[in-house]
Image (cartoon, rainbow, N blue to C red):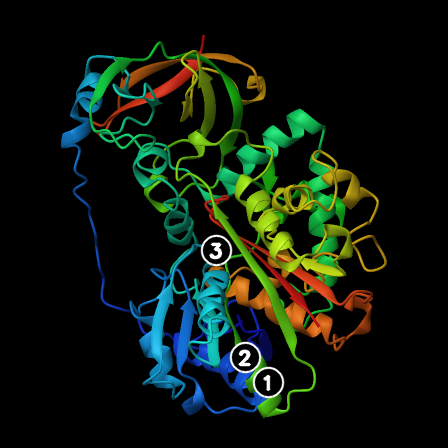
Amino acid sequence: MKKVGVIGVGHSRFGVRQDVNLCELAFESVKEALEEAGVTSREIPYVAVGSYGVWYEEPLPAVAIAEYCGLTGAGLAKIEAACSSGSAALLAAYTAVKSGYIDLALAIGIEKMREVDTLTAVEIIGRAGSYLWEFENFGMTFPAYYALHAVAHMNKYGTTEEDLALVAVKNHKYGAMNPLAHFQKEITVDEALSSRVISWPLKLYDCCPISDGSAAVVLASEEKVKELGIDTPVWIEAIGFSSGTANLSKRKDYVGLEASVEASRMAYRIANVKPDEIDVANVHDCFTIGEIMAYEDLGFCKKGEGAKMIREGQTEVGGKIPVNLDGGLKAKGHPIGATGVSMVVELTKQLREEIKPSTRQAPMKNYIALAHNVGGTGHYCYVTILKR
Amino acid sequence: MSEIPTLRSRKLEILYNIPISKTLKFWQGLREGKIYATKCKKCGKLYFPPVADCAECYSSDMEWVELSGEGYIETFTHVNVKPASFQSEPDYTVAIAKLKEGIRVLAWLTDIKPENVKVGLKVKLFTEVRHDGRVIYKFKPA
């Protein structure tokens, strides 16, 4: 099996991007990624586009984007894994290069969620899971699914609403330093706690925004990396994956996501990396409880001690393992198909130690980073380990 | 902030006709106040939501089992921001309860003040004909 390197990354500004259409939004990140890699669109044999769709007008985003970006002729696919569509697209591109089948591939993550009104967006994502048994008669929403986990976690481990607020405060702090973030504003614990209830106990500041955005990465085989003379490739050491039942009623418990545990175990095993060797991580904080559960499910701490990590500042720069230094889904925004690719873009820059301002650059010891991308409520999970 | 120019697309309205032939007894049962699960005759696995095929042993020889509806709440949430198609509903509480039979059910919890809902609360399922003619199942305190 070949080694696979990330040789070019691109990232649009996340937020309400009604200034651009789907293709124009993709172009922003594709152009940057190709230029960084030093390759042209004509050299790319395969493009995987991670996207959920429905909230934008194009049913074939891969085809529309490819035409707009001069990629027509490449093998194309839109790949859906809900909020982990970006990672699923990355896996498709990765395995194509890893196997030796092709030596260059492009993974794009994109979502354009703001072309529909907010409550329609709430409906589209609320239907994701088991439509017939959890939405049709009970109107589940994405915040409600994570709220079910927050209540269970609070009940079992004594996690508090203040702990959840601390996650939002941390991620807004870093989001404020990221010019590509949807929210570039610090918030206080009081502001978070007094924001309006969305699905108790989750309040507005516990929830990621509904965002537009795109991200792109160019992957290359080791031979291609040498041929192109790339001096700072970041290697994909492993992509672990797992999944959970469609019906939340079929899960064993609600204090974590089994798919995260399994996907991370697979990634750690393949990469031969231990959780305490990771220098920086991006975890799936679509809701604040998601970040606390991720600390535990990924083995950054013991089960039930996630809240302690945030209270002690262990996941800030200078802590045991800095997490979501780009603001996370919470502040950077969560254009759902873009997120998995966005995480790899951020972590590639972290590993290259080129983050500006340096106050959100993680110190590097082992040059190992981890991206944890969940689709739905643990319906899908992908964990990617990168190394420089 | 000035309005960003956009072009309004043509409207697309989609309604799905969801097949229920293989689980018809469940939907008919609701109208009689009964809540059914299915059980695999070959391996004995109990399914809720009811299914026509066993994912464990791949048998399609299933039998219907009426549920007691008795259980306790494992987790819950009070939903304030509701999806577009639920705008006419008052805010609702969703709970997942584990039933005596060992399976879990997700449904609305009613007949209780939100502040009194706790993990561990004993509940019972019942059926209800909704204002729009749909028949659904809900939890209430036991």
User: A256 or A20, which is in the foreground?
Assistant: A256
Q: Is residue B1 above or below residue A311?
A: below
Classify residue B20 by image quadrant.
top left
Q: CA distance from mark 1 to mark 2?
A: 6 Å
Q: Residues within 10 Å of mark 1 (few under 14, many from 20)?
A: many
Binning the other alpha carbons within 10 Å of mark 2 as few (below 14), some (14 to 19) or many (20 upward) gives many
> Which residue is drawn at the image coordinates 34% and 25% (left, top)?
B48
Residue B103: percent from left, percent from top:
41, 20
**A292 w.r.t. A185: above or below:** above
Residue type at tag 1: Val
Residues tagged 3 and 2 counted as in contact (Cβ below 8 A)? no
Pointer 1 with pointer 2, Cβ within 8 A: yes
Question: As rendered, which of A170 and A233 lies closer to the eye?
Answer: A233
Secondary element type, mark 3: loop
| Residue at horizontal 41 percent and vertical 50 percent from the top | A125
Q: Is residue B36 left or right of residue A150?
A: left
Q: Amino acid at mark 3?
A: Cys
Q: Residues within 10 Å of mark 3 (few under 14, many from 20)?
A: many
Query: In the image, what residue occupies the spot 71% across and 72% down?
Result: A388
Q: Is residue B127 visible?
A: yes
Separation of residues labelled 1 and 3 (CA atoms): 30 Å
Q: Which residue in the structure is indicated by mark 1?
A: A225
Q: CA distance from mark 3 to mark 2?
A: 27 Å
Between marks 3 and 2 in the image, the one whose residue lies nearer the viewer? 2
Which residue is identified by label 2? A221
| Of residues A314 and A140, the one drawn nearer to the viewer in this rendering | A314
Name the front one of labels 1 and 3: 1
User: Which chain is home to disc 3?
Assistant: A
Which residue is disc 3 drawn over?
A: A83
> Which label is found at residue A300?
none
A152 with respect to A65 (left or right): right
Q: Position of residue A226 (x, y in %)?
A: 61, 88
